[in-house]
Amino acid sequence: MTKPLTTPKKKNPLVKSEIAQVLPAIRSRAALAMSCHASLGNFVLQVCDDCHSSTYPPRDRCPKCWGELKWKPQKRAGVLLADTTIRSTNNLYFQQHIPWRIGTILLDEGPTAFAHLHGDIKIGDEIVMNIMLDRSGAPALFALPRKASLHMEDDYQYRQFTASPKNRRVLISDGRNKIGQALAKELINGGAETIYLGNSDMNLLFDGKESLSQNPKIKIIPLNLLNTESVTKTAKQYGGKIDLIINTAYHVRPGSVAFSGKITELQNSLDINVNALSRLAKAFCPTLSSRSGDKERPAVAFVDLVSVFSLTGHPSYASMSASSAARLSLINSLRTEMKTTGLKVYSILFGPIDDEWHQEILPPKISHKQLASTVIESLKKGQEISTVGNVAKDILLRWQLDPLLAIKEMSP
Amino acid sequence: MTKNNTTLTELAKAISNESVKIVDLTNTLSPDFPVIILPPEFGQCEQFKMETLSRYDGNGPAWYWNNISMNEHTGTHFDAPAHWVTGKNIPNNTVETIPVKDFVAPAVVINISEEAKINPDFLLTKEYLMEWEKIHGKIPPKNWIALRTDWYKLVGTEKYLNMHEDGAHSPGPDKSAIEFLVFERDCLGLAVETIGTDAGQAFDFDPPLPAHSILHGNGRYGLQCLKNLDKLPTFGSIIIANPLKIEQGSGSPLRVLALVNG
């Protein structure tokens, strides 16, 4: 049974931190395609169109008959046949993490595969197979116990693939808005050690401040995302103490391109939805990257919350969706940039929120709590891209099938 | 040497030997300085923003400079008559057309700091001003009316905007005071240390925001977010307030100075 995590001990200030090592980057297009499925939490394998056999690792053609391979969802069930523990290796990544246990899994669908193992699995146990992304963004098979065990998320090997908030010190970039506040509460429930809650305007009271500031785990700190100097200063002060950043900055105003929209609102949207992300990344990511290999308290992830209309645009929310598209593009670039550093980048695509700014959109809408819960679940599962609400789920699905059609379907 | 030159020479000498002192009435323009908050469905006043273009680095090895942006009414700023709907048809109502002689003018300081300390919603009334004149003397025409509240000492705290669920709470004039100052004392404008020339709760007055409405509707000006009005005498100071020459500008951030006898 997994031992529950204890509070990490204080770092010896005289010990040099380890540099994060990451596994080699993906070399084949097939492996990249698998990583895309993995980023959405799907379990797929390549199946041959001709001989119908499934195969792993990813290949360009069927190894049995040279037939064409197609990605198909697979049953996750399997059994652990054999295991071994790596205790010595030339691989720099595994040198940092040995002993490391791997095993042979017989999947119910037929193929056998090597997989990283959760500590609670013994030979003969039934497992649930997942494709997870390692710190370099490469897909890897990871076997979890069929039946969730107590403190399962605390397993050392599993934690290398996830960013569970337990015992982490988290920065919420905008703690004044309702998303940030809901997230602070969920993070505390998820076992976060400290929440640094960004306050963009120390001169102005905000709803919820009083109750939040009573929680000893929450520290309200000055962080004006529109001010590069403020973000830089906060990064210098707190960057060494933050393991996880969640960017909750969000600016939304209804308005079309030609008739009802305002240039000033587009400017505001770009500044909050795009420039703020850039300021945060520039100020914090170098520091967090340098700590992503720390044994006790690694910096693990940068999470960005972005409207699903970033994919398609929305005629009645033109500025918000345009700036969200730019934001999504920026976060995609950041994800690639961070591949060599070991810092994972997560995107949470959300549908319309049930608040005063989305009154013009018909239900279904999501609550702030629902959004916050999805963030926590994604971090716990190590899922890089998640959707919140049926609208977001539906739009992403349509966009995956046919992006141009998905855009056309946004007509009012 | 002409008479004018003699006056200026004497002034230069007085400034040099500090028998005339220069008081800075300006708050530092920074992203942290508060701006007025309107109901969220309206367009919002943009705070001061600054991005470094280069600072002796690869983007400019020997020079330091920044890109800045802000609203015309950010930081210590000037309100032109065109700022308010009542002043939209006044001649020369934007900053680039205002007669420049109006940018240098004497000031009368009305001190309501004690009252404002006790009651943040304190209102200056005509009655108060008439009582004030009995003690200090009549307010001369074409003066800035500098309303000293010591509010600038609250900058950097939540008490400066003092925004609550029912709106902001800060001192200012009521309709009777503004009508008295404009129509009976022919003031040049109202100069305040608070975020606006109107009181925090003035959106609920009749007429709403009487200082903006009456001042600008009659071609008078506003100066907001000042500091150091407590360094000025009741009479005898001169305020220098030159807004930027923005085409069709409704106002402008500016450096406001006062000349006082040393």
Image: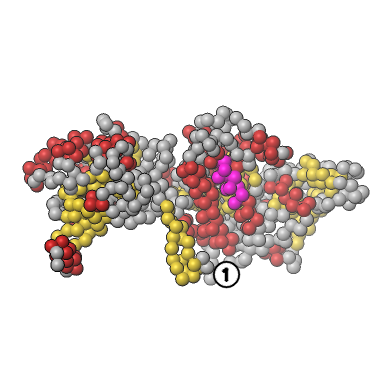
Residue A271 location (% of width, % of height): 49, 49
- Quick one: which residue is furthest to the front in this view? B2
Using residue B93 as the reference point, say whether residue A50 is left or right of it: right
Quadrant showing the N terminus of chain B:
bottom left
Q: Is residue A354 above or below residue B64?
A: above
- For image coordinates 62% across by 37% down, the residue present is A392
Q: Residue at x 29, y 44 (%)?
A: B92
Looking at the picture, how far across and down is residue B55, in whole percent?
A: 46, 66
Q: Residue at x 46, y 51 (%)?
A: A226
- Camera-side residue: A138 or B138? B138
Range of the magenta residues?
A: A320-330
Q: Residue at x 26, y 30 (%)?
A: B206
Residue wearing tag 1: A16
* In the displayed structure image, the side of residue A233 where residue B211 appears, left or right: left
* Occupied quadrant, residue A352: top right
Q: Is residue B58 magenta?
A: no
Foreground of the two, B63 or B152: B63
